[in-house]
Image (cartoon, rainbow, N blue to C red):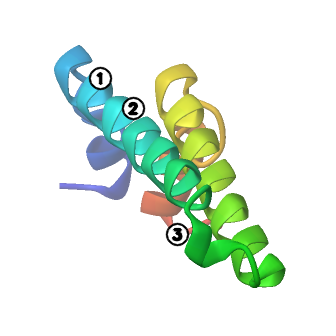
């Protein structure tokens, strides 16, 4: 099997897989943001900011998965599989 045939045989992305990943990312981000509101985070502004940035990353990954933004675009997956980063 040549490299081109493997790239053209990429499986279609199923809706249930995509929805599960999106819900998981959003729940992880929401849980992280909710936990930064507890009193134990009051004296730790940099740690709190780090967790909030992590939550923002989770929200982005969920949206990227849902709408096929970077790093989930089909062209990027094909380039990675071909070895042309």
Image point (42%, 60%), residue name: 81
**SS under mark 2:** helix
Q: Of callouts 1 and 3, which one flags the residue occurring earlier in the amino acid sequence? A: 1
- Quarter the N terminus occupies: bottom left
Report x, y in % for residue 47.
71, 82
> How many marks can you see?
3
Residue on which the image places disc 3: 83
For this orientation, the residue located farthest to the top is 15
- Foreground mark, 2 or 3, reads 2
Image point (78%, 69%), residue name: 49
Rounded to the nearest angstrom, the CA distance separating label 2 from label 1 is: 5 Å
Left of 72 or right of it: where is 8? left
Depth check: give the residue in front, 12 or 32. 32
For this orientation, the residue located farthest to the front is 39
Q: Are marks 2 and 1 in contact (CB under 8 Å)?
A: yes
Depth check: give the residue in front, 71 or 23. 23
The label on residue 22 is 2
Report x, y in % for residue 3.
34, 57
Residue on which the image places disc 1: 19
Rounded to the nearest angstrom, the CA distance separating label 2 from label 3 is: 28 Å
How many residues crowd around disc 1 within 10 Å: few (fewer than 14), some, or many (20 or more)? Answer: some
Q: Residue 85 sits in which quadrant?
A: bottom right
Depth check: give the residue in front, 5 or 80. 80
- Answer above or below: position of 39 versus 73: below
**SS under mark 3:** loop
Q: Residue 48 sits in which quadrant?
A: bottom right
Report x, y in % for residue 21.
31, 37
């Amino acid at each position: 099997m040549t490299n081109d045939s493997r790239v053209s045989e990429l499986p279609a992305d199923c809706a249930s897989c995509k929805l599960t990943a999106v819900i998981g990312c959003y729940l992880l981000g929401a849980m992280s943001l909710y936990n930064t509101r507890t009193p134990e985070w009051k004296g730790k502004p940099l740690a709190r900011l780090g967790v909030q940035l992590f939550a923002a990353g989770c929200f982005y990954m969920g949206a990227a998965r849902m709408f096929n933004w970077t790093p989930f675009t089909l062209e990027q997956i094909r380039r990675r599989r071909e070895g042309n980063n």
